[in-house]
Amino acid sequence: MFIPDRMYDTVYDIPDTYFTENGIKYLFVDIDNTLVPYEIQNPTKENIDWFERMEKLGIKLFFVSNNGIERVKKYTENLEYKYNADIKKPLVKRYKKFMAENGADAGHSMAIGDQIFTDVVSAKRIGMKAVLVKPIKDKKTAFFRFKRIMEKPFIAIYKSREKREGKI
Ligand SMILES: [Mg+2]
């Protein structure tokens, strides 16, 4: 539940083959610190190029954010992708409803985010693949530092598992 299926530095580093080999058709992406830092309101050129890359793979993109509607609306204002703000990860009620409304089944879905206790846990509870990326820029609060410290043992488990399986 706390261990991501894969870890990459950024969303851009996830190879196309990882999506195609897993039969991924639906991608649920966190915004803050996964695509842009908190203070950046709009998608970057790199973000948009990556969205297009995903589209070329036949993947449908969705944004799933714990942040409020205003932030998410602003980020997506010029995009055609659907979103769910204030989705309350790691809870899964709203998340599952959002998936069902969009015809996304867990078996063909993947989540990408920068936090184990929200992004990874919600995805694993739903039964989909979860990719953890490095946070672009963390908030400098004590709470955030605490969360990152709590994530460390799970990242260590992931790394030893990967090493054992000869992936890295
Ligand atoms: Mg995030």
Image (tube, grey):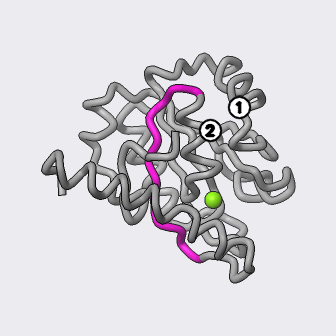
Badge 1: how crowded within 10 Å, few (<14), some, or many (20+)?
some
Q: Is mark 2 within 8 Å of ligand 1?
A: no
Q: Position of residue 99 (x, y in %)?
A: 65, 24
Q: Is residue 136 left or right of residue 167?
A: right
Q: Which of 52 and 39 lies nearest the eye of the viewer?
A: 39
Q: Which mark is residue 122?
A: 2
Q: Position of residue 65 (x, y in %)?
A: 71, 49
Tell me what residue is drawn at x 33 percent, y 37 percent. Answer: 19
Query: Which of the 4 quarters of the picture holds residue 96?
Result: top right
Q: Position of residue 152 (x, y in %)?
A: 48, 65
Q: Which of 36 and 48 lies nearest the eye of the viewer?
A: 36
Q: Is residue 35 left or right of residue 155?
A: right
**What kind of element bears circle 1?**
loop
Query: Does the CB distance between marks 2 and 1 fall below 8 Å?
Result: yes
The first of marks 2 and 1 along the sequence is 1
Q: Which of 121 and 62 lies nearest the eye of the viewer?
A: 121
Q: Amino acid at mark 2?
A: Ser
Q: Is residue 81 left or right of residue 49?
A: right
For the image shown, how many numbered marks are present on the structure?
2
Q: Amino acid at mark 1?
A: Val
Q: Which residue is mark 1?
A: 92
Query: Which of the 4 quarters of the picture holds residue 64?
Result: top right
* Quadrant where the image shows the C terminus: bottom left
Query: Which of the 4 quarters of the picture holds residue 85?
Result: top right
Could you tell me how far apart the alpha carbons at marks 2 and 1 are, in whole angstroms?
Answer: 6 Å
* Image-quarter location of ligand 1: bottom right
Which portion, as a residue range, is magenta? 126-137
Tell me what residue is drawn at x 17 percent, y 45 percent. Answer: 165
The reply to whether the magenta stretch includes residue 124 is no
Badge 2: how crowded within 10 Å, few (<14), some, or many (20+)?
many
**What kind of element bears circle 2?**
helix
Tell me: residue 156, above or below residue 162: below
